[in-house]
Structures are given as structure tokens and as C-alpha cells.
Image (cartoon, rainbow, N blue to C red):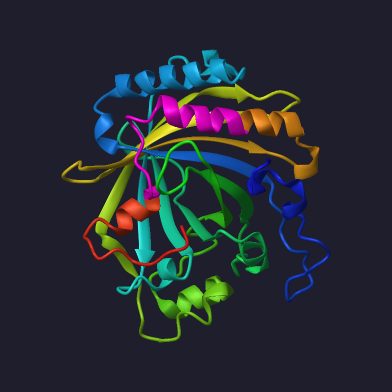
């Protein structure tokens, strides 16, 4: 039996439109994620140790795993800040708002990036939500199907649909205060019915700044042109360097889901499940990277993850 997340027919947005007549966004990315125990990562060697597990699972699934292009690459460092109300109104309604800054040699590199996303297990619900911002500058919409392990056991798969938009926080084009509810509903019209108080402000979730250490591993080739870049990341809190969570992921982009080979998709699915068994001592079930930040102080919020 083919799992629901492998059914191409579910990925057509049809001829439906947003309020301004723009066609509904379609899924153009497939990203698979396995959440890992952050305490397993103590050095760069930890990334290499996990790479060996990936290679073993790839061999079993008859998947080519090319790592030469990533040899010698150093881990990338990024700061990730999540913004929400005190009651986690965004996250409780399947929204995520974060600000991301890349660092090189200890200093910020490039412009800060805003990522706004709506994540939901139902494709229709995710596609109908218009995430486009009202800003003068450029932005990029990324609509993904995300594969995650089952919440309570390894060896399975479930889907979330992540409807994202990203843009650079360029002071020449955009300088508004993104912690103000009034500003937020102007920038993100999708939040208009959620943030109603004019004096309401967003704050740093759990007063936590996240430091992400990201290591590129290599490219997985599932055949028929289906290739996916893979990496491992670990999130820790700035200051006390508390290891929050790790994540292995791989992602491919496509123009039309129907163009992906059914055989390659099945091989991808087989690899994803085999890797869970091979990495079972590393896996942390039932959460996401974002979920780990929101649950840091206890009293976990509700979400659609």
C-alpha cells in the first residue's frame, strides 16, 4: 500500500485563487526531517558519525550518497529568534514567525532574514492560507511538503504542509517594528483576524535566542533526476549553550509533483524509514526544532505539528 504522502493527486491546488485573483500556491518542495537528541552532538565529529549512519541506510535502500562536494566544509552558524505573543497566539494557530541571522567568523554576514510560515497537516488548509507579505521589497514563497516520523514510533512517516514566505530585513526597504501587532497585520494580512489588540506586542519566545550549527553532508540521489541536498543541524541556547535538539534533513525542489518518478519516491520513502531504524539511538520523537524552543520553559502550547 502506498502511503498518503506519496499520492501525487493530493498536491494539485486546482484552479482556485486567492482574494486578489492570484492562483493558489502549489507545493514545489519535498523536505524530510528526522529530529535528533541534541545531547548527541558534542563536536564536529558528531556530524561525521551521523553521516556514516546516513551512508549505511542509503546503501541498504540503493540510494547514491555523494559527499565529495561537502568535504572540508565547516559548520555554518546562524542565530534564530522566534517571536510570538505571551500566550503563543501565533504558534497555537499554526503560524511561526522567526528572524534569522547568518554569522561568519563570529560576525553577522549579510542581511537578516524574516521567515513567516503556516504549517498544517491538511494540504487544502495550508494552500488556502495566503502567506504573501505586504512589503515594498522582494520576497520568496516556499510551499513544502514535510515528512516527519510518526510521533510515537520509528519507521513510519507523516506529512505536514509548510507554506512559507521569506524576505530580507533590508533597512532601505523595510524598517517597521515587527514586534508591534499593528505593524504585523499590515505586513502579514493573514494575521489580521488573529492579532486584534492595537497595543499587543510580540516578544522573544521563552526569552531564548537559538544558535544553530549547520553541517552540510552531501547529496542523496534517488534516481530519475530526484536529488536532495542533506544536512545535520543542532540548536542550542545562546549564553548557557544548552543543547536543545538536532535535526537531519534532506530537500528537493520540483516544478510539478507529477514529474517525480513514482519509483524514486518509493525509494526515498524506503530510505527515510530505514534511516530511522539505523539512527534509533539518536532520534527524539514527537517534536520539531520549533517545538523544542516553545516547550523550553514547560507549559507546552497547542500546535498543528
Instruction: Name the outermost residue toward the right.
Output: 15
Looking at the picture, does residue 19 appear above or below residue 11?
below
Camera-nearest residue between 10 and 87? 10
Camera-nearest residue between 279 and 181? 279
Relative image position of residue 211 (x, y in whole percent): 31, 43
Horizontal arrangement in the rendering, residue 174 relative to residue 35 (left or right): right
Horizontal arrangement in the rendering, residue 1 relative to residue 245 (left or right): right
The magenta stretch spans residue 272: yes
Q: Is residue 165 visible?
A: yes
Relative image position of residue 169 (x, y in whole percent): 48, 57
Q: Is residue 66 visible?
A: no
Q: Which residues are magenta?
A: 269-289
Relative image position of residue 295 (x, y in whole percent): 28, 58
The magenta stretch spans residue 41: no
Looking at the image, which residue is at 40% across and 49% down? 288
Looking at the image, which residue is at 27% across and 30% down? 40
Looking at the image, which residue is at 61% across and 61% down? 122
Horizontal arrangement in the rendering, residue 36 relative to residue 267 (left or right): left
Looking at the picture, does residue 229 appear above or below residue 111?
above
> In the figure, residue 109 lies in which quadrant?
top left
Horizontal arrangement in the rendering, residue 105 relative to residue 16 (left or right): left
Looking at the picture, does residue 163 appear above or below residue 272?
below
Looking at the picture, does residue 43 appear above or below residue 212?
above
Relative image position of residue 194 (x, y in whole percent): 48, 79
Amino acid at each position: 500500500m502506498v502511503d498518503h504522502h506519496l499520492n501525487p493527486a493530493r498536491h494539485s491546488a486546482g484552479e482556485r485563487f486567492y482574494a486578489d485573483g492570484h492562483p493558489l500556491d502549489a507545493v514545489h518542495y519535498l523536505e524530510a526531517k528526522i529530529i535528533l537528541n541534541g545531547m548527541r552532538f558534542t563536536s564536529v565529529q558528531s556530524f561525521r558519525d551521523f553521516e556514516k549512519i546516513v551512508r549505511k541506510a542509503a546503501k541498504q535502500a540503493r540510494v547514491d550518497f555523494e559527499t565529495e562536494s561537502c568535504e572540508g566544509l565547516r559548520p555554518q552558524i546562524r542565530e534564530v529568534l522566534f517571536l510570538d505573543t505571551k500566550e503563543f497566539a501565533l504558534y497555537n494557530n499554526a503560524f511561526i514567525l522567526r528572524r534569522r541571522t547568518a554569522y561568519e567568523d563570529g560576525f553577522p554576514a549579510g542581511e537578516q532574514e524574516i521567515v513567516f510560515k503556516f504549517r498544517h497537516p491538511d494540504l487544502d488548509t495550508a494552500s488556502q492560507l495566503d502567506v504573501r507579505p505586504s512589503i515594498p521589497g522582494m520576497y520568496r514563497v516556499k510551499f513544502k511538503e514535510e515528512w516527519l516520523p510518526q510521533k510515537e514510533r520509528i519507521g513510519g512517516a507523516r506529512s505536514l504542509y509548510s507554506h512559507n514566505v521569506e524576505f530580507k530585513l533590508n533597512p532601505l526597504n523595510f524598517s517597521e517594528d515587527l514586534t508591534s501587532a499593528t505593524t504585523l497585520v499590515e505586513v502579514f494580512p493573514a494575521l489580521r483576524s488573529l492579532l486584534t489588540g492595537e497595543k499587543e506586542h510580540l516578544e522573544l519566545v521563552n526569552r531564548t535566542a537559538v544558535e544553530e550549527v549547520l553541517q552540510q553532508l552531501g547529496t542523496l540521489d534517488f534516481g530519475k533526476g530526484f536529488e536532495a541536498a542533506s544536512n545535520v543541524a543542532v540548536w542550542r541556547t545562546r549564553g548557557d549553550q544548552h543543547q536543545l535538539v538536532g535535526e537531519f534533513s534532506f530537500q528537493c525542489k520540483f516544478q510539478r509533483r507529477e514529474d517525480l518518478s513514482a519509483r524514486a519516491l518509493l525509494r526515498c520513502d524506503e530510505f527515510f524509514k530505514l534511516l530511522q531504524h539505523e539512527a534509533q539511538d539518536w532520534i527524539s520523537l514527537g517534536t520539531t526544532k520549533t517545538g523544542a524552543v516553545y516547550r523550553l520553559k514547560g507549559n507546552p502550547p497547542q500546535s498543528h505539528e
